[in-house]
């Protein structure tokens, strides 16, 4: 194992860590999220591979890749060395003044991996920024062709596309809209093609067809030529718990968008970069190729803030000729971000991590499917590759979710953490749509590590059932 430096900053910090909100100034960012007096999280000391250690020396397995971001694991020498070299050479270069070799090389290698139709890359700092950029790019693509009446962007309910106001406007999260709705233009929503707890009178295929029909009808109802784009996650994230739509839905979505002249945007912030066993997860549905692709999380793998939009060369050229892309950030095209993106991409491709995600995902899926049969609270397993989710239910026969107040997914994540296993869970719609946790280890995970993760999940699920009072 590579020797990693311990966190030298720790010597200047109080030990043991005080409860959150108790100091007169400072405090870590978690103080914004929890009530005063909440015990502090364990303090990170170092990380290597799929493992993390706190300052007491306790080891954890990161079965969530952070927030489904750290695709190549921790302490990767290729990435760290590349980052240091670029930082020493030029940590920043204003793109209005200079281009950078890192930006040029990253764009070249990334578009080669993405394939035809995605020849241009706009690099930003994360998923929310990337979705914002995609929405603005789609609008300007339409305007460049004289289609100025198109501005509405349809999305799914539930869904998640980011925390900025533009990204929230297309996010299907009722709680977020309750809070921030007065500050934004909320966009039209259509039902998500869920595959578990389907409404009465439908099976998976007929519900998928119904959801597609609602999309078709909504485009018409919103007014002729008024709808600009439809945005969806091809494989769901935390809003739908690794939802994998029925193939009939994906095929119909592409046909509907083509017929109405609607731009199809795929949000692959969580699913892109090889995590599902394909570089871009829409490759699982060859007849549903999007017009724009949004990526983040795994493309930077946690080493540097990075997000991006993939776009076709001809449409970008039209925007450039009509005055240029009316959008930007101080750090767009940042050399450090592009250096990290290139190193992560090379590591992913050269080490065969996409094939490993498919193989280890199948191994993990088999173990989790067995857990559905064994546990009284695991109702469903879904996902692709190493983007998986467990849905927790109070009554498996009726598929009844736990009450929001039970905090079922949070309980499972807490129990797992107590046992040294990190899972990723986040509540969408304040838990109104059910409870799930993501099982999404780094793509470098070995067979032995997948078995360790599966063993830990089985133990944690048993204890969670006991704490929730389900026999």
Image (cartoon, rainbow, N blue to C red):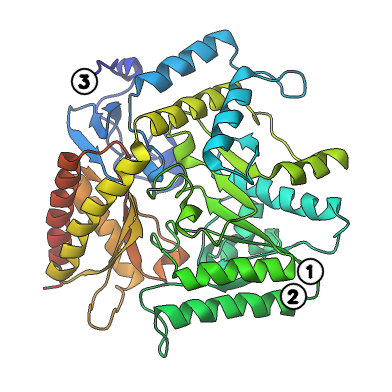
Q: In percent of the image, x 69 and y 52: which residue is there?
A: 135
N-terminal-most mark, 2 or 3: 3
The residue identified by callout 1 is 226
Secondary structure under tag 2 reads loop
**Circle 3 crowding by C-alpha within 10 Å: few under 14, some 14–19, many from 20:** few
Residue nearer the viewer, 225 or 238: 225
- Quadrant of the snapshot with the N terminus: top left
Residue 415 in percent (x, y) is at 19, 52
Query: Residue at (64%, 50%) from the top-left corner?
Result: 292
In the rendered image, which residue does mark 3 sit on? 1
What residue occupies the far top of the structure in this picture?
A: 88
Q: Secondary structure at mark 3?
A: loop
Image vertical order of residue 12 relative to residue 129, above or below: above
Is residue 339 visible in this depiction of the protein? yes
Q: Is mark 1 in CB contact (under 8 Å) with mark 2?
A: yes
Q: Which residue is mark 2?
A: 222
Q: Earlier in the sequence, mark 1 or mark 3?
A: 3
In terms of image quadrants, where is residue 114? Answer: top right
- Residue 421 horizontal/vertical position (percent): 21, 44
């Amino acid at each position: 194992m590579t020797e990693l430096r311990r966190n030298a900053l720790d010597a200047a910090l109080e030990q043991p860590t005080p409860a959150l909100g108790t100091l007169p100034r400072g405090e870590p960012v978690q103080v914004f999220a929890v009530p005063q007096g909440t015990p502090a999280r364990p303090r990170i000391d170092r990380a290597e591979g799929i493992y993390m250690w706190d300052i007491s020396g306790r080891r954890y397995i990161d079965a969530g890749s952070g927030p489904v971001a750290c695709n190549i694991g921790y302490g990767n020498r290729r990435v760290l060395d590349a980052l240091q070299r670029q930082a020493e050479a030029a940590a920043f270069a204003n793109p209005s003044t200079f281009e950078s070799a890192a930006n040029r090389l990253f764009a070249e290698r990334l578009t080669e991996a993405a394939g035809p139709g995605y020849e241009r890359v706009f690099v930003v700092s994360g998923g929310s920024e990337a979705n914002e950029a995609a929405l603005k790019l789609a609008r300007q693509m339409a305007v460049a062709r004289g289609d100025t009446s198109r501005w509405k962007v349809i999305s799914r309910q539930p869904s998640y596309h980011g925390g900025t106001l533009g990204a929230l406007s297309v996010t299907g999260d009722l709680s977020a809209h309750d809070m921030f709705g007065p500050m934004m233009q909320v966009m039209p929503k259509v039902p998500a093609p869920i595959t578990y707890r389907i409404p009465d009178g439908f099976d998976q295929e007929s519900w998928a067809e119904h959801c597609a029909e609602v999309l078709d009808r909504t485009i018409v109802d919103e007014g002729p030529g008024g709808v600009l784009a439809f945005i969806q996650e091809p494989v769901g994230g935390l809003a739908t718990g690794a939802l994998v739509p029925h193939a009939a839905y994906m095929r119909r979505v592409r046909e509907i968008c083509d017929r109405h002249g609607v731009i199809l945007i795929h949000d692959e912030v969580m699913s892109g970069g090889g995590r599902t066993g394909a570089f871009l997860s829409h490759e699982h549905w060859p007849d549903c190729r999007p017009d724009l692709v949004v990526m983040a999380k795994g493309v930077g793998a946690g080493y540097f803030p990075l997000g991006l939009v993939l776009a076709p060369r001809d449409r970008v050229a039209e925007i450039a000729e009509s005055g240029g892309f009316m959008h930007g950030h101080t750090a767009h095209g940042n050399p450090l971000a592009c250096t990290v993106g290139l190193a992560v991409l090379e590591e992913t491709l050269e080490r065969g991590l996409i094939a490993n995600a498919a193989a280890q995902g199948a191994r993990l899926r088999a173990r989790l499917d067995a857990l559905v049969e064994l546990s009284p609270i695991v109702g469903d397993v879904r996902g692709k590759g190493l983007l998986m989710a467990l849905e927790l239910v109070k009554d498996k026969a009726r598929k009844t979710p736990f009450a929001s107040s039970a905090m079922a997914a949070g309980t499972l994540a807490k129990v797992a953490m107590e046992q040294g296993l990190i899972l990723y869970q986040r509540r969408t719609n304040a838990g109104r749509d059910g409870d799930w946790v993501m099982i999404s280890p780094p793509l470098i995970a070995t067979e032995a590590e997948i078995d360790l993760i599966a063993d830990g999940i089985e133990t944690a699920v048993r204890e969670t059932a006991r704490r929730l009072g389900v026999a």
